[in-house]
Amino acid sequence: MDKRKVYLDNNSTTPLDPRVLDVMFPFLKEKWGNPNNIHVWGREAREAVETARENIKRMINCRDGNVYFTSGGTESNNWALKGIAFANIDKGKHIITTKIEHKCVLNTCKWLEKQGFEVTYLNVDREGFIDFDELEDALRKDTILVSIMLANNEIGTLEPVREACELVKDKSNAYFHTDACQAIGKMEVDVESLGVDLMTISAHKFYGPKGIGALFIRNGVKIDPLLHGGGQEKNMRSGTENVAGIVGMGKAAELVMKELDADKEKLRRFQKMIIEEILEKVKRTHLNGPSDLEKRLPGNVNFSVEGVEGESIVMMLDDYGIAVSTGSACSSKQLIPSHVLMAIGLKPEVAHGSVRISAGRFNTDEDIAYFLEVFPGVISKLRSISPLWQG
Ligand SMILES: Cc1ncc(COP(=O)(O)O)c(C=O)c1O
């Protein structure tokens, strides 16, 4: 069998689209001006930054608010949570989020708890969905913010954000934030139809460069800046703009607007093929996350494979040139199962055998065929040497 190189870890990061790189180059080479200057170099950079902003606003249908550039999803999530918390302290100190958010939300919440805020972490069901009754019960007079992700990065659950936001608006005065890092580029994301007040975006999840992202903030939202300094981004996010990164993100947004339908159709097809074939061919393998693909992030698959460890699967697939991820992280010689897999109720030993396969724009039918050819053999080999496997 020929060894190919197949990247199926697009939920970790996506490859930079060559068309994005092409438009970034001039801004690293000859168009290196500072957009805050009024001379021709500055004006050229400013124009590029504002064109990119318009593209991103169009991509998310932003009509009543603005997008502010940040260094990525982590900063945007930190800003949304800390910025709302401290600007609205007069209204209350209670925040609601879920147990399956990305660590940059959960660890920010933990830090806020140390600063005297109170955080409710909502449970999720076996497929990762929040419960509306629990959300409603958690809302209080002093709740200032609810933060619920649009698409989970591990198990692909698409949270019912529009309905949750409607409920929160109906029953409270809290702001609503969503982390849309994984959703953008793989499904329609429209801030008007979602109704959210704040939304986090990260370019490297939709074929843009790393180290650049944005926070959508609706008009009228009371939020403090996270970074103070020279007053860039309308005093909301200081620091000289990452012009090449912003231009790249703008191009990536333009490509999403043009190609989303085709990308989505392909990702759905690959996802279905992988799920159906692996569940059929590899016995005692279970799908984590929603089984209804309409409620699942296109391209995302997450399996628990009994009798083997996720890290071994990742390593052996790597030998075959295939890149995937696992939900267990090896740290200080202890295998720590993912908080998401724990939250959906998996036993630690089952969570340890988890593997995430995530397809993207550049995957081909041949890539998927190669993966499907290799995967069952890898699992058989690992099971044959595993003390955990009682076949
Ligand atoms: C759901 C989600 N939120 C936030 C982030 C962090 O984004 P960034 O890598 O741009 O800081 C990620 C990245 O893995 C993510 O998947």
Image (spheres, grey):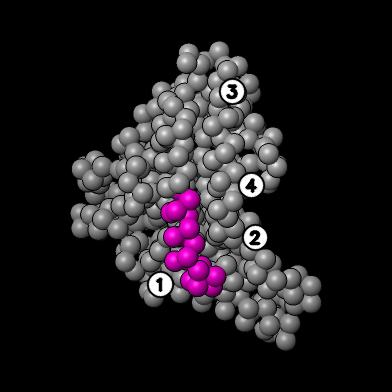
- As measured in the structure, the alpha-carbon distance from the residue carrying label 2 to the one carrying label 4 is 15 Å
Magenta part mainly helix, strand or loop?
Answer: helix
Residue 163 percent across, percent down from the top left: 26, 55
Q: Is residue 266 magenta?
A: yes
- The residue at the point 39 percent across, 27 percent down is 346
**224 lies above or below 304:** below
Q: Does the residue labelled 3 lie within 8 Å of ligand 1?
A: no
Q: Is residue 329 magenta?
A: no
Q: Position of residue 38 (x, y in %)?
A: 68, 84
Asked if the residues shown at circle 3 and circle 2 are in contact, with their CB atoms under 8 angstroms apart, the answer is no
Which secondary structure lies at badge 4?
strand
Q: Where residue 317 appears, x then y in whole percent? A: 63, 35
Tag 1 secondary structure: loop
Disc 1 versus disc 4: nearer the observer: 4
SS for callout 3: helix
Sequence order check: which comes first, mark 1 or mark 4?
A: 4
> Which numbered disc covers residue 6?
4
Q: Real-space Cα distance between discs 3 and 4? A: 20 Å
Q: Nearer the N terminus, badge 3 or badge 1?
A: 1
The magenta segment is 254-271
Q: Which residue lies furthest to the bottom in this view?
A: 40
* Distance Cα–Cα, label 3 vs label 2: 33 Å
- Residue 89 in sight: no
Of all residues, the one furthest to the front in this rendering is: 1
Residue at image point 42% right, 47% down: 272
Mark 3 residue type: Leu
Q: Which mark is residue 382?
A: 3
Where is mark 1, residue-wise?
61
